[in-house]
Image (cartoon, grey):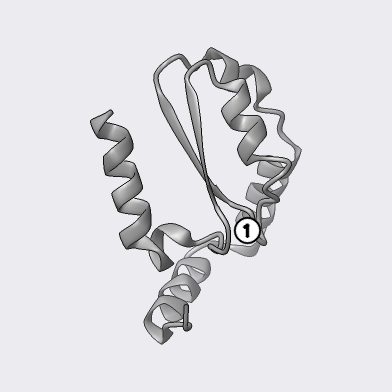
């Protein structure tokens, strides 16, 4: 997919809305918090969508493990989608979400 100036500018805008300390603390919290017990408590059907090419959250350490820990998790894996796939690949992501919700 070719980069869209509008998407790049919107992500920049979102990044500028927070402070550096808040961004740093958020990254620390997400990278150092073990959500295992929280995931095990979720019993409703959950669709875990993850790309093997995600450069922000490594696929092997996240997607398959999250789906496995969920009592009723389904993993949908994409090959070449970026971390921002709900924006850059909205047509595919939305179709897959709707299909999951209809099941």
Where is residue 57 drawn, in percent x and y?
A: 66, 51
Where is residue 60 drawn, in percent x and y?
A: 72, 43
Residue plotted at (72% across, 46% down): 28
Residue plotted at (49% across, 75% down): 12
Where is residue 53 drawn, in percent x and y?
A: 64, 60
Residue situated in front as seen by the camera: 23 or 2: 2
Q: Give the secondary structure at mark 1.
A: loop
Q: How many marks?
A: 1
Where is residue 6 drawn, in percent x and y?
A: 37, 82
Local crowd at mark 1 within 10 Å, few (<14), some, or many (≥20)? Answer: some
Residue situated in front as seen by the camera: 96 or 42: 96
> Can you tell which quarter of the image residue 82 is in?
bottom right
Residue plotted at (54% across, 13% down): 41
Residue plotted at (62% across, 25% down): 68
Residue situated in front as seen by the camera: 57 or 92: 92
- The residue sitting at the left extreme is 102
Q: Which residue is mark 1?
A: 54
Relative vertical location of residue 57 with respect to residue 98 in this rendering, above or below: below
Q: Please state, as top left, top right, bottom left or bottom right, where the C terminus lies in the image.
A: top left
């Amino acid at each position: 997919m070719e980069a869209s100036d509008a998407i790049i500018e919107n992500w920049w805008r979102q990044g500028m809305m927070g402070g550096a300390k808040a961004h740093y603390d958020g990254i620390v919290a997400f990278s150092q918090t073990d959500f295992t017990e929280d995931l095990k408590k979720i019993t409703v059907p959950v669709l875990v969508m993850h790309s093997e090419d995600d450069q922000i959250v490594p696929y092997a350490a996240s997607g398959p493990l999250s789906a496995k820990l969920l009592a009723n998790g389904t993993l949908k894996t994409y090959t070449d989608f970026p971390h921002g796939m709900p924006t850059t690949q909205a047509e595919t992501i939305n179709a897959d979400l709707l299909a999951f919700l209809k099941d």
